[in-house]
Amino acid sequence: MSDHSKTTEFVPYVPASKSLPEMTLTAIILGIILAIVFGAANAYLGLRVGLTVSASIPAAVISMAILRGLFRRNSILENNIVQTMTTAGEAIGAGAVFTLPALFLWHVHVSQGLFIFIVLTGGFLGVFMMVPLRQLLIVREHEVLPYPEGTACAEVLKSGEQGGSSAKLIGIGLGVGAVVKGLGDGFKLFKTEVETGIGNFKNALVGLDTLPSLLGVGYIIGPRVAGEMLGGGLLAWVVLIPAISFFGSGSAHAIFPASIPVSKMDAWAIWDNYIRYIGAGAVAVGGLITLVKSLPSLFGSAFATFRGVTENRGGIKADPLRTQQDMPAKYVWIGIILIILIIAFVPVTKVGIIGAVCIAVFGFLFVSVASRIVGIVGSSSSPVSGMTIATLLIVTLLYKATGFTGKEGMVAALVVAAIICTALAVAGDVSQDLKTGYIVGGTPWKQQIAMMIGVVASGSIIGFILILMDNAYHMGSAALPAPKAALMKILAEGVLGGNLPWNLIFIGAAIAITLEFFGLNSLVVAVGIYLPVHTSMPIMFGGFVRYFIDRFSKSEEDRRDKVDRGILFASGLIAGESLVGVIIAILIYAGVPVPEAALSASNLLPFIIFILLSFLLYFVSVRGKKRHV
């Protein structure tokens, strides 16, 4: 049976012969609002933890609740447009916070215009470069590439009658997360960080950030990933830091890169001066290992994709069927060429022709790879970090070879990596969205336009969000470590500047390689090493809740139902805390007096609140099957 006959057999939920309201003004306005909200929330989360969470299912649920509840509209295609625009905000947030905060760490004055330029060019390239691939990856390989998030979102949309109860779970979680964050970090009624030493074990420290978002993240990623991340944190804070403290206790001289002797340092000072470099080396090599492990899929995906495009040159031409109409090919290619030329010659970024050529080459290569890989393993497992690290290293080496060094060279290399990272994040998300649209019967060109509108909406405010967060919490601090961006900074400095403690970075690299031989995910453990243990500990609490759900459910269907309920509530916790975090940053930026210190210095009160929050997450997950409305 031919590929064509296979694709024509599939009939979407809304057939091509039927037309429902789709890209309506109501859907566009709601999509813009949710794109901005989830973009800000994911930016906050990415700066704190170094990862983001999928927005498609929460967006679909919220969209159904609003469109059905407030506007009495019941078009599945409208809901699909809204969730498509919302995921653009998530993708822009990820692409920005994984790279651009390095500019703050360099104390480079960056205009809003540059932020907007970077994320819009990257976002548009991600959409444009995915368009020619839709016929191959989404249509012709519908039975081969499952696109897990896209398929799951389609099932949520088709089961629209769940919108009422599901939306309540997100709403309750959002309220709880907002209240806890507001009372803790807003009104400072209690501390949101507890820590304790370990007996006579000098400088061994464990701690817990009692934040709802971290509990929610742990539940979503599950106990294994959460456990590996905590393992990295414990390795740093109860092994490496005490070891450095012990061996350096007799030294009266500072050891590079620190400016004071180890004997005068506490645990936090050792983490700041030494562990972060070890963690950065581990994260860099962990990301590259992830990329190397993906090489068979990478090359296979690239060859299969380019072969498919060659065999199907007409694939992006408008088909008479509504469900097969992409954006016109000529506009797609004109858009790509114009963006590359603008990047090369407009003096906003100063990346030059070398940078623009790298963006074009790596953009086409990695977008095709990312779009196929997310179809197999999902967006959360796509090696975006590894591909961004590879891009940054190659670009910095090219710049160094041509004499473009110093801070200008580092900033230019980072801008290239930021554009590529944003393009990869957007391409992966739009791939999932187009899969959703293919299943439910959406119009592809309308989804592609909707994604671009979402890119503009979230991209227009992401720079403002980053500046707010820096003013309120300070990039690179324990409160806002921005781990992925700090890594990009260190790598660029290492290649173009050379003034780095390479021994520490090599120690981290060796740890990552050793972890791989233990069968662990070196990148996840490395992120745990880099971040304070205070961040990974509450994530493990969420992982424990998820473990008990998985372990004691009566059947697979029962387990899936409970996990789904918990994920919706956890998504609300993340969104609620993140949005209040942004609001607090706005108040600080505006000069509104905010309490400096917590009214209570007790470690017990915030710990009890966090334990109660964990029990609430468990209770919400297990309290019964979803009630349909």
Image (cartoon, rainbow, N blue to C red):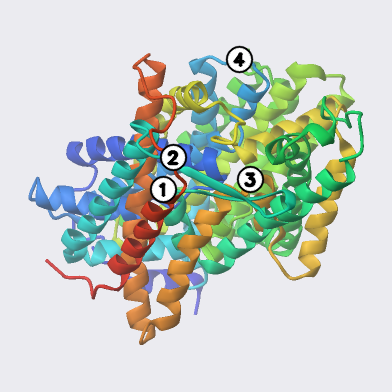
- The three-letter amino acid code for the residue at tag 4 is Val
**Residue lying furthest bottom in this view?**
554
Q: Are the residues at dot 2 and dot 4 in contact (C-beta closer than 8 Å)?
A: no
Q: Nearer the viewer, mark 4 or mark 1?
A: 1
Q: Give the Cα distance between marks 2 and 4.
A: 48 Å
Residue 606: give its label. 1
Task: Verify CB contact (< 8 Å) between mark 3 and mark 2.
Answer: no
| For marks 4 and 1 on the same chain, the one whose residue lies earlier in the sequence | 4
The kind of residue on which mark 1 rests is Pro
Between marks 3 and 2 in the image, the one whose residue lies nearer the viewer: 2
For residue 417, which numbered disc appears in the image? none
Tell me whether circle 2 and circle 1 mark residues in contact (CB < 8 Å).
Answer: yes
Numbered tag placed on residue 531 in the rendering: 3
- Report which residue position mark 4 lands on: 346
| Badge nearest the viewer, 4 or 3 | 3
Residue closer to the observer: 335 or 230: 230
